[in-house]
Amino acid sequence: MIEPRVLLGVVIAAHGIKGEVKVKTFTESPDGLSAYGPLTTEAGRSLEVVALRPGKAGEAVVRFAGISDRNAAEQLKGQSLYVPRSVLPQTSEREFYRADLIGLSAEDAAGRRLGIVKAVHNFGAGDVLEIEFAGGTTEFIAFTDANVPAVDIAGSRVVIVPPSYAEDE
């Protein structure tokens, strides 16, 4: 079985002429990018962070071992950077890694399967679960206690309160 990976960042551009890259980070702080050991790309290439400094908000400037010039840095543009799920710290109650939520069964309070969690988004106003319903349609559900009263990672399910829409009068 392949160990699940968690996306920590994406290389967005080369930075300077000495092999540094700008990385859009998905960690609580940019330093989190180097906190869990080597990063791997989608294709499995291992990249060791040898230097890191914060950039603009949500970004870091990173130098990887073996990447020593702009040409090599430009080859990394667009690469997603992952770590194994097992190296991340445990979460507290009602705290979840997005990767743990994707793929969970979405059920109603009675336990009837409605669909699956397709993705987790944040468009600026808070986290939103994208639920793909059995018929193939998708809906966004605000990830609040009222809309998602239960998350059972071990049971591979979330309980959702599906939206109800008032009939047009």
Image (spheres, rainbow, N blue to C red):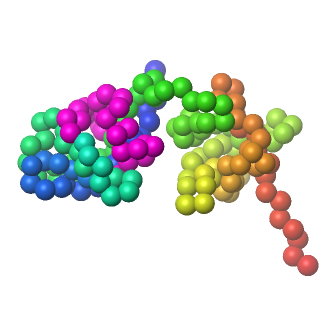
Is any part of residue 111 visible from this angle?
yes
Looking at the image, which is closer to me, 21 or 32? 32
Q: Where is residue 90 in the image (x, y as percent from the top left)?
A: 54, 26
| Side (left or right) of 86 relative to 101 | left
Q: Residue furthest top?
A: 1
Q: Position of residue 93 (x, y in %)?
A: 66, 31
| Residue drawn where x is 55% and y is 55% of the image | 122
Q: Is residue 33 shown above or below 74?
A: above
Looking at the image, which is closer to me, 37 or 167? 37
| Count of numbered marks | 0
Is any part of residue 132 visible from this angle?
no
Any magenta on residue 36? yes
Q: Position of residue 42 (x, y in %)?
A: 33, 39
| Residue drawn where x is 59% and y is 36% of the image | 96
Within the image, what quadrant is residue 5 found in? Answer: top left
Q: Position of residue 104 (x, y in %)?
A: 64, 36
Any magenta on residue 34? yes
Q: Residue furthest right?
A: 169
| Residue drawn where x is 16% and y is 35% of the image | 65
Q: Quadrant of the C terminus?
A: bottom right
| Residue drawn where x is 12% and y is 36% of the image | 66
| Side (left or right) of 93 relative to 21 | right
Highlighted magenta segment, given as a residue range: 24-51
Q: Which residue lies furthest to the bottom in this view?
A: 169
Q: Is residue 155 shown above or below 69?
A: above
Q: Is residue 139 shown above or below 50?
A: below
| Side (left or right) of 150 relative to 55 | right
